[in-house]
C-alpha cells in the first residue's frame, strides 16, 4: 500500500513538473517580444557589470602569469602584488597606444580628409576614362549619369536625415564611455577580491545543487574559463604582433595610411578565419584611392603576412587553444557571426569549442557505458 502511494505521488510530481514547463513554454512563446524587450533593458542596466567582468577576465591573464613568476611566499601578498602589476601593465599599454598610435591615426585621418576632393576627382577621371575606352552606348551612358545623380541625391538626403541623430549619437557615446569607466572600476575591485568572490560563488552553488551536479558544473566552468582564457590571450598577442609587423612593413614599402592599415589589420585579426581577409580588403580600398599600385603592393604584402601568421605565429602563439579542425572553426565563426555579428565571430569559436569538448566527453562516456554493459551481458551468459 505504501509503495503504491509513493508511485502515485511520484507520478503526480512528474505530471506537475511537465505541466509547469509546458505552461512556461507557452507563456514564453506568447510574450516572446515583451520578454526580449525586458531582457534588452536589463542588459543595458547591467552593462557596466558585464564590461567589468570581461575586463576582469582579461586582467586575470597577466595576473596569473605574475603569480607564477613572483617569488613571494605569502599567497595573499603575492595575489595583491600580481593584481597591481596586472593593472599597471594594462594602463601602460593603453598609455603607449594613446601617446604613440593615436597621434599617427589622427595624422592619417587628417591627411585622408584633406585628400578626399582629389580622391573623388581621380575616381571620376578614372571612371570617365573607362567609359570612353569601353565606348558604351549613349542610352547606357545616360542611365549611368542618371544613377550617379540619383545616388548623389540619396547620399545628401541620407546625411540630412542623420543630422538630427547626431545629438543622440553623442549621448550614446557618452553613456558608453561612462559604462566602460564604471566597468573598469568594477574590474579592479573584482581582481582584488577574486578569492572572496570565488568562495561566495562556490558556497552559493554548494547550497543550490547536490554534490554530483556541483561537481559537473564546476568542471564545465573550469573548462569554459580555460578555453576562453587561452583563446583570448593567444588572439590578442597574435593581433598585436601582426599589427606591429604590418606597420613596419608598410613603413618600409612606403604605403600610405600605414598606421590606419596596421590598426585595421591587427584589430580584425582578432576575428578567426575571416578577420585577416576583411582587414586586408578594407585597408586596400583605402589605399586604392591614393595609389592603385601601392594598394596592389599592400595586397601582396598582406597575403604574405597572413601566410607567415598562419604557418609560424598562430601555431606557436595560439596553438591548439580551441582544439578544432578548420571545418569546425569556419562553422563556429559563421554561425556566431550570423547570430550575434562581430562579437559572435570573436566569441563563437571558444564557445563552440567548449560545446564540442562537452559533447566529446559525453559521447565517450556513453560508449564506455555501452561497452561495459555488453561485456557484463556476455559474462552473465
Image (cartoon, rainbow, N blue to C red):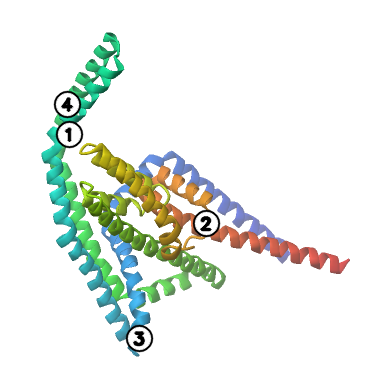
Q: Residue at x 76, y 64 (%)?
A: 373
N-terminal of the pair, mark 1 or mark 3, is 3
Q: CA distance from mark 1 to mark 3?
A: 61 Å
Residue receiving disc 3: 75
Q: CA distance from mark 4 to mark 2?
A: 48 Å
Q: Circle 3 — which element?
A: helix
Q: Nearer the viewer, residue 117 or 271?
A: 117
Q: Residues within 10 Å of mark 1 (few under 14, many from 20)?
A: some
Mark 2 neighbour density, 10 Å: few (under 14) some (14–19) many (20 or more):
some
**Residue 311: x and y, percent?**
45, 57
Residue indicated by mark 2: 324
Separation of marks 1 and 2 at Cα, in angstroms = 44 Å
**Nearer the camera: disc 1 or disc 2:** 1
Residue 238 sits above or below residue 128 on the image: below
Q: CA distance from mark 2 to mark 3?
A: 36 Å
> Where does residue 230 sit, x and y in percent of width and height?
42, 65
Q: CA distance from mark 4 to mark 1?
A: 22 Å
- Report the front residue among 295 and 164: 295
User: Disc number at residue 274?
Assistant: none
Q: Is residue 118 above or below residue 326?
A: above
Circle 3 crowding by C-alpha within 10 Å: few under 14, some 14–19, many from 20: few
Tell me if residue 161 can be seen.
no
Task: Depth check: give the residue in front, 50 or 280.
Answer: 280
Q: Residue at x 43, y 61 (%)?
A: 312
- What residue would you read off at disc 4? 157
For disc 4, the neighbor class at 10 Å (few under 14, some 14 to 19, many from 20) is few
Question: How far is disc 3 from disc 4 in space, using C-alphas?
Answer: 63 Å
* Quadrant of residue 167 within the rendered picture: top left
Using the image, tell me which numbered label, if any, was put on residue 119.
Answer: 1
Amino acid at each position: 500500500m505504501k509503495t503504491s502511494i509513493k508511485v502515485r505521488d511520484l507520478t503526480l510530481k512528474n505530471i506537475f513538473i511537465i505541466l509547469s514547463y509546458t505552461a512556461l513554454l507557452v507563456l514564453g512563446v506568447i510574450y516572446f517580444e515583451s520578454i526580449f524587450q525586458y531582457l534588452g533593458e536589463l542588459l543595458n542596466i547591467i552593462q557596466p557589470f558585464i564590461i567589468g567582468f570581461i575586463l576582469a577576465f582579461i586582467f586575470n591573464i597577466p595576473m596569473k602569469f605574475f603569480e607564477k613568476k613572483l617569488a613571494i611566499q605569502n599567497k595573499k601578498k603575492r595575489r595583491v602584488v600580481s593584481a597591481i602589476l596586472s593593472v599597471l601593465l594594462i594602463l601602460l599599454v593603453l598609455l603607449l597606444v594613446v601617446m604613440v598610435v593615436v597621434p599617427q591615426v589622427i595624422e592619417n585621418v587628417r591627411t585622408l580628409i584633406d585628400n578626399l576632393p582629389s580622391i573623388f576627382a581621380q575616381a571620376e577621371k578614372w571612371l570617365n576614362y573607362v567609359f570612353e575606352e569601353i565606348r558604351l552606348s549613349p542610352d547606357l551612358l545616360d542611365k549611368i549619369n542618371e544613377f550617379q545623380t540619383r545616388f548623389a541625391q540619396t547620399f545628401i538626403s541620407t546625411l540630412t536625415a542623420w543630422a538630427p541623430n547626431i545629438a543622440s549619437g553623442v549621448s550614446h557615446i557618452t553613456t558608453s564611455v561612462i559604462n566602460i569607466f564604471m566597468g573598469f572600476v568594477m574590474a579592479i575591485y573584482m581582481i582584488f577580491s577574486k578569492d572572496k568572490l570565488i568562495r561566495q560563488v562556490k558556497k552559493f552553488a554548494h547550497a543550490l545543487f547536490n554534490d554530483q551536479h556541483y561537481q559537473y558544473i564546476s568542471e564545465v566552468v573550469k573548462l569554459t574559463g580555460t578555453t576562453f582564457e587561452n583563446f583570448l590571450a593567444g588572439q590578442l598577442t597574435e593581433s598585436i604582433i601582426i599589427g606591429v609587423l604590418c606597420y613596419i612593413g608598410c613603413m618600409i614599402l612606403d604605403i600610405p595610411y600605414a598606421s590606419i592599415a596596421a590598426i585595421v589589420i591587427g584589430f580584425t585579426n582578432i576575428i578567426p578565419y575571416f578577420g585577416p581577409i576583411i582587414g586586408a580588403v578594407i585597408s586596400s580600398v583605402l589605399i586604392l584611392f591614393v595609389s592603385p599600385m601601392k594598394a596592389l603592393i599592400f595586397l601582396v604584402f598582406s597575403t604574405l603576412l597572413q601566410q607567415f601568421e598562419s604557418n609560424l605565429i598562430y601555431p606557436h602563439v595560439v596553438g591548439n587553444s580551441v582544439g578544432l579542425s578548420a571545418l569546425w572553426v569556419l562553422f563556429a565563426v559563421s554561425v556566431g557571426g550570423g547570430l550575434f555579428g562581430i562579437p559572435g565571430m570573436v566569441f563563437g569559436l571558444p564557445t563552440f569549442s567548449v560545446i564540442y569538448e562537452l559533447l566529446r566527453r559525453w559521447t565517450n562516456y556513453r560508449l564506455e557505458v555501452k561497452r561495459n554493459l555488453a561485456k557484463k551481458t556476455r559474462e552473465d551468459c
